[in-house]
Amino acid sequence: MYLQADLTNIELAEKVSLSTSACFRRVKALKEASYFRASHADVDLEQLCEYVFAYIEFTSDNNSAAMRRKFADVIKDMPHIMDCMQLSGDVDYISFSCFPDIKALNEACTALSDNPNLSFNLLKHA
């Protein structure tokens, strides 16, 4: 079951040579005894998501006026970043973005993190 959590009760009963009712009772007993911690699906987000809306937080090592201008120049050429605001506190900027997929979002975050003209010590998206 741990390799194929999506088996139906009928399929599982056939695999373990039990009647469907006996199989159901045993699985139910295992669940009630907390033998199963979780069940999840490995979802292909690339296929599922047509667009990905995300907030991206930027924390910079250098918050000088020159660095702020460099940052503004870089993100103005990124059409997927729709809005960006400067904040006070632990996070310097937050942007609202819309990317075609998760891969594009991750690539943009990597490009911004790796940009030698910018000095981010933390970049995260949610």
Image (tube, rainbow, N blue to C red):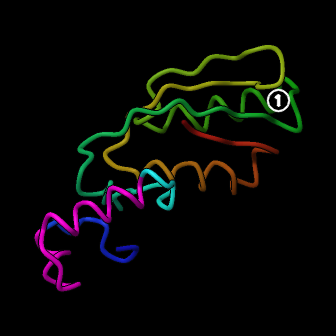
Q: Residue at x 88, y 26 (%)?
A: 64
Can you tell which quarter of the image residue 7 is in?
bottom left
Q: Residue at x 69, y 57 (%)?
A: 114
Residue nearest the observer in this picture, 110 or 53: 53
Q: Is residue 11 above or below residue 15?
A: above
Residue 120: where, in percent of width, then height? 78, 43
Q: Of helix, strand and loop, which mostly describes the magenta segment? A: helix
Q: In this view, does 46 lie above or below 123?
A: below
Answer whether residue 23 is magenta in the image: yes
Residue holding disc 1: 66
Q: Residue at x 34, y 58 (%)?
A: 41
Can residue 46 be seen here? The reply is: yes
Q: Is residue 122 above or below residue 90?
A: below
Answer whether residue 84 is magenta in the image: no
Residue nearest the observer in this picture, 120 or 6: 6
Residue 89: where, in percent of width, then height? 83, 17
User: Which amino acid lies under the numbered mark 1 shown in the image of this protein?
Assistant: Ala
Residue 80: where, in percent of width, then height? 41, 36
Q: In the structure shown, which secondary structural element does the residue marked by tag 1 occupy? A: helix
- Number of callouts in the render? 1
Can residue 120 be seen here? The reply is: no
Q: Give the quadrant of the N terminus.
A: bottom left
Q: For the magenta stretch, what is the residue range?
A: 10-31
